């Protein structure tokens, strides 16, 4: 055998005839040393992971990028156009030109949501996925701008996000009245919210839910503009 300490080769024995080490005790020492080393490595990895998570959250301590005056004017104009032309109730006969343009953009994400959430193999989730994706995409955009501390981009994303609340609320309310034309000229059997209200038996509160979405959208738009306005004033008060 070979001594694990001095590497001296010798016949099998309990102690080394060259250095005198007791093999059993020395092996116990090596096992204990390796165990401590493994535990230290695990602790180091946990510390590294914690530091990485803290670094990700460190963006919250960074200052927001200032909002330039031209950007503030442009975004304020968008907010004003929403305030003027967006529907003032959930039962509308037709879209205004401005609202129709915004609706058609959101419609792309709505239809994509059916495909995306349909991949999960659940029919109810696929139906809900259209409206859900309308809210999810602008929220992801807001999160990205928030992480980068870009206040102008975040305000635009909030405008898009809460504008979709209003868009979805009108579709929800139409589940009872079936006045809105559906894409491709489909019939009422393809109406998302009619099917959802039927599935969950929510006809007793369908208009309450649609009004909640509607007013949440308007309140969100107003608060987002107030936040943008206060931020711009704070950036330029000196």
Image (cartoon, helix red, strand yellow):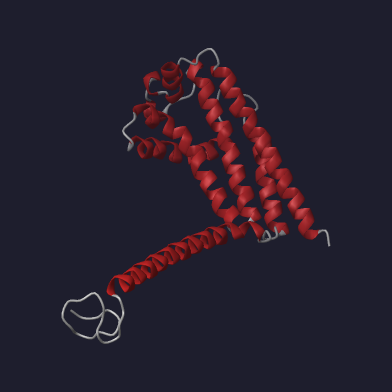
Q: Nearer the viewer, residue 3 or 212?
A: 3
Query: Is 180 placed above or below 28 here?
Result: above
Query: Is 7 placed above or below 193 here?
Result: below
Residue at x-position 53% and y-position 30%: 168
Report whether 225 appears left or right of 118: right
Name which quarter of the figure residue 58 lies in.
Answer: bottom right
Report whether 148 appears left or right of 235: left
Residue 90 visible to an observer of this rendering: no
Residue 152 visible to an observer of this rendering: yes
Residue at x-position 54% and y-position 62%: 51
Report whether 143 appears left or right of 34: right
Q: Nearer the viewer, residue 151 or 31?
A: 31
Name which quarter of the figure residue 149 lies in.
Answer: bottom right
The x, y position of residue 10, in whole percent, is: 18, 83
Farthest residue to the top: give it. 204
Residue at x-position 75% and y-position 54%: 232
Q: Nearer the viewer, residue 150 or 121?
A: 121
The x, y position of residue 150, in whole percent, is: 62, 57
């Amino acid at each position: 055998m070979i001594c694990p300490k001095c590497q001296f080769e010798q016949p099998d024995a309990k102690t080394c005839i060259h250095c005198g080490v007791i093999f059993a005790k020395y092996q116990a020492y090596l096992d204990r040393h390796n165990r401590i080393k493994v535990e230290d490595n695990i602790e180091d990895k946990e510390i590294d992971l914690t530091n990485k998570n803290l670094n990700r959250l460190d963006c919250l301590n960074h200052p927001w990028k200032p909002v330039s005056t031209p950007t503030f004017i442009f975004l304020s104009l968008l907010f004003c156009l929403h305030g003027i032309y967006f529907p003032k109730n959930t039962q509308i006969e037709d879209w205004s030109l401005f609202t129709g343009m915004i609706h058609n953009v959101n419609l792309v994400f709505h239809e994509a949501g059916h495909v995306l959430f349909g991949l999960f193999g659940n029919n109810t989730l696929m139906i809900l996925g259209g409206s859900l994706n309308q809210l999810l995409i602008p929220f992801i955009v807001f999160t990205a701008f928030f992480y980068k501390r870009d206040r102008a981009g975040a305000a635009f994303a909030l405008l898009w996000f809460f504008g979709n609340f209003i868009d979805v609320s009108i579709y929800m309310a139409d589940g009872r009245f079936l006045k809105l034309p559906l894409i491709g000229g489909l019939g009422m059997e393809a109406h998302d919210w009619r099917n959802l209200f039927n599935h969950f038996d929510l006809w007793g509160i369908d208009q309450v839910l649609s009004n909640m979405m509607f007013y949440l959208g308007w309140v969100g738009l107003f608060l987002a503009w107030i936040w943008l306005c206060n931020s711009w004033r704070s950036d330029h008060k000196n």
